[in-house]
Image (cartoon, rainbow, N blue to C red):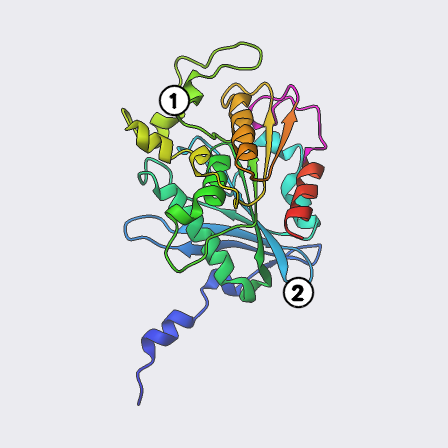
Amino acid sequence: MNDTFWEDLANIPTLSEAEAIHRPDGGRFYPSLIAAEFDGFRPLMIDLTLPPGSGPHPVVLYIHGGGWVIGSPKITNATLLRFDPFERIVGAGYALARVSYRLVNEARFPAQIHDVLACIRYVRAKADRFGLDAARLAVLGESAGGYLALMAGLAGEAFGVKGQSSGVQAVVNWYGVTDLLTIAEQGHADGRPQDPGARPPAERLLGRASDPEIVRYASPISHISATAPPVLTQHGTADRLVPFAQALQLHKAMTAAGARHHLDPIEGADHCFWNAQDTGLTNRMLGFLGTALS
């Protein structure tokens, strides 16, 4: 008699994959998918929302913010809730995967990038199981998550796993850090300086006295190429945490490299689109995704 214990165990769907919460719109919600597990760490979790229908659905992976030190895919910034972007993404026919990553006090850089790429590979591997279109996949990140979305899109090959695709077809960057070397020196559009009491992003992510070459390598702007997926950057012009100059710097560098970058300044908005007057930003994001993932 053949002993198939290990093979059978590996092929049994986890409870989180076998059971879905049915939504009023006819879609499904999987609240606790396990994308990857590491000895000694909590597992990487994904909340997956599927629109009605059998698919295959294009996918948007959402990466939360929080300065790489706090945050969860289960928590939405209160300011963003005013725009209701996530229900609108699902309402437009996209599957929404809200992904997690280890914070810097849990694991050192570049674990955060590896975790996001692992979540991308999980979604791609489970495409048939959930009715997803593995060839139409975008990442959307806000703040620290915007940085990680850019790194996934621009530097995924440098940090990925050989032989496994973690590539994406589009990136939406909401006010993410683009150059860790320059951000500490940049002021704001209205002349205000950076908060002198705040830890610089490079120090928060990489630790004190990091080698400038490591800081450069850890910056999305260092990984731009003409073959990069299209990027949409939506950034408040009055952002006091990540200066709008970071968005301008990315736009100039991508344009110079022949890469596709769409810059959408949100006039007068602070970090997290606080005080944003233009509520059409979600429509513009959906328009970008529709074109990039067509």
Q: Which residue is mark 2?
A: 54
Mark 1, mark 2: which one is toward the viewer? Answer: 1
* Kind of residue at badge 1: Pro
Could one spot residue 175 in this view of the protein?
Answer: no
Q: Residue at 57% across / 58% down in the picture? A: 135
Marks 1 and 2, how far apart in space?
46 Å
Q: Which residues are magenta?
A: 267-281
Q: Which residue is mark 1?
A: 200
- Residue 148 coordinates in the image, percent (x, y): 46, 39
Q: Residue at 30% across / 83% down in the picture? A: 3
Q: Main secondary structure of the magenta part?
A: loop
- Residue 169 coordinates in the image, percent (x, y): 56, 50
Count residues near mark 1 (Cα–Cα under 10 Å), then give few for <14, some for 14-19, many for 20+: some
- Residue 184 coordinates in the image, percent (x, y): 41, 19
Residue 244 sits in quarter: top right
Count residues near mark 2 (Cα–Cα under 10 Å), then give few for <14, some for 14-19, many for 20+: few
Residue closer to the observer: 94 or 260: 260
- Residue 9 coordinates in the image, percent (x, y): 37, 72
Quadrant location, the N terminus = bottom left
Relative to 125, say whether 120 is above or below: above
Q: Earlier in the sequence, mark 1 or mark 2?
A: 2
* Kind of residue at badge 2: Ser
Q: Which element carries disc 2, helix, strand or loop? A: loop
Q: Residue at 58% across / 43% down in the picture? A: 230
Could one spot residue 188 in this view of the protein?
Answer: yes
Q: Which element carries disc 1, helix, strand or loop? A: loop
Identify the disc placed on residue 239: none
Residue closer to the observer: 13 or 267: 267
